[in-house]
Image (cartoon, coloured by chain):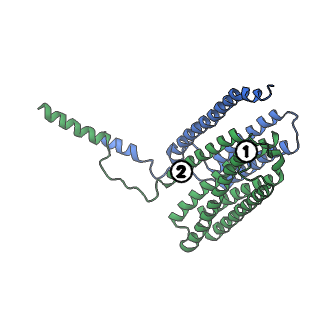
Amino acid sequence: MSQSVTADSTGDLTARYFDLHEHDHPEGGSTMLGFWIYLMSDCLIFAMLFAAYAVFGGNYAAGPSPRDLFDLDLIALNTAMLLFSSITYGFAMLEMEKGKVGATQMWLAITGLFGAAFLAIELYEFSHLIHLGAGPQRSAFLSSFFTLVGTHGLHVTFGIIWLVTLMVQVAKKGLIQANKRRLMCLSLFWHFLDVIWIGVFTFVYLMGMLR
Amino acid sequence: MSAAHDTHGHDGHHDEGASHGSLKDYLIGFFLSVVLTAIPFWLVMGDVLASKSATAIVIMAFAVVQVLVHMVYFLHMNGKSEGGWNLMALLFTLLLVVIVLAGSMWVMYHLHMNMMPVHDMRQLP
């Protein structure tokens, strides 16, 4: 008697606290949240690199300091490129919502060009620094500088590769649901890189000039 | 009871995805970002403020505000997107970032302080 009551109430509790039925999970239903959590983990990588730069940023090893090396005009131009690419990606997303393939592709292409301009300016700056003998091996300051800024640049590079891939996908298959989802993920990625760049130009370049 | 539980647990599944922005949102965000970028560059490049530490504090404040602007207007962050999980993940990450940054700087600053006498000893005869 008492045993059957226990079994009965256990069954009741199982039904109450656990899901016993399969539910319909639409394809890609959890992609955006998962991608956001990936971005948060990326954010932690950048936090480590910022922490390393904060600790090593003053160790010049009798080498050049930020004031000797950085050209703020160039950095302002670079910042503008990334900011423009953010707003043009936003325009691409708005056209995507309207379902206009041509306009979406055009804004994506413009975004890619701004991203490429950003990369070109950054690579020019890096090659200029290395030419001056201020490469990553010169001092702890420069090692942490190249690691932090280079990691951001690498993210932008992969963002551009991703962007071109998606443009090909949209050209081939149109603005299908899967492509829209991919474009939304890249949107998060692209705007996230702009957020990281705010930290870079403030803490590395502007604060560096104040030292 | 069990039926009520089922509907409660699963209705927020499809409709509360990532939120989208409007043209107005993007333009406001872009305008604010330009202003919030231009002022710190102007402060540093033009040597506007006499005190360097005051300039540093002001440009850091501008950076924090600009990050918030980007989060709201470009990443469309709000308490409702993905049923609040985006915001939760963000807040948790921010907590970790603050611990990592503040902790590293605090520890290394004290390490530098403890190492000061070593440098002084070189000046001894």
Q: Which chain does tag 1 point to?
A: A
Residue corresponding to mark 1: A141
> Cβ–Cβ below 8 Å for labels 1 and 2?
no
- Circle 1 crowding by C-alpha within 10 Å: few under 14, some 14–19, many from 20: many
| Three-letter amino acid code at the position of disc 2 | Tyr
Q: Specify the colour of chain A.
A: green
Q: Is residue B110 visible?
A: yes
Residue placed furthest toward the bottom? A172
Does residue A176 lie above or below A35 as drawn? below
Q: How many marks?
A: 2
Dot 1: element: helix
Q: Specify the colour of chain B.
A: blue
A203 to the left or right of B15: right
- Residue A55 locus on image (x, y percent): 68, 38
Residue corresponding to mark 2: A38
Q: Nearer the viewer, residue A69 or A109?
A: A69
Does residue A52 lie above or below A184 as drawn? above
Q: Which chain does tag 2 point to?
A: A
Dot 2: element: helix
Q: Quadrant of residue A154?
A: bottom right
Does residue A131 lie above or below B16 as drawn? below
Which label's residue is closer to the chain start, 1 or 2?
Answer: 2
Label of residue B57 in the image: none
Does residue A177 lie above or below B5 as drawn? below
- Residue A152 locus on image (x, y percent): 66, 53
Discs 1/2, front: 1
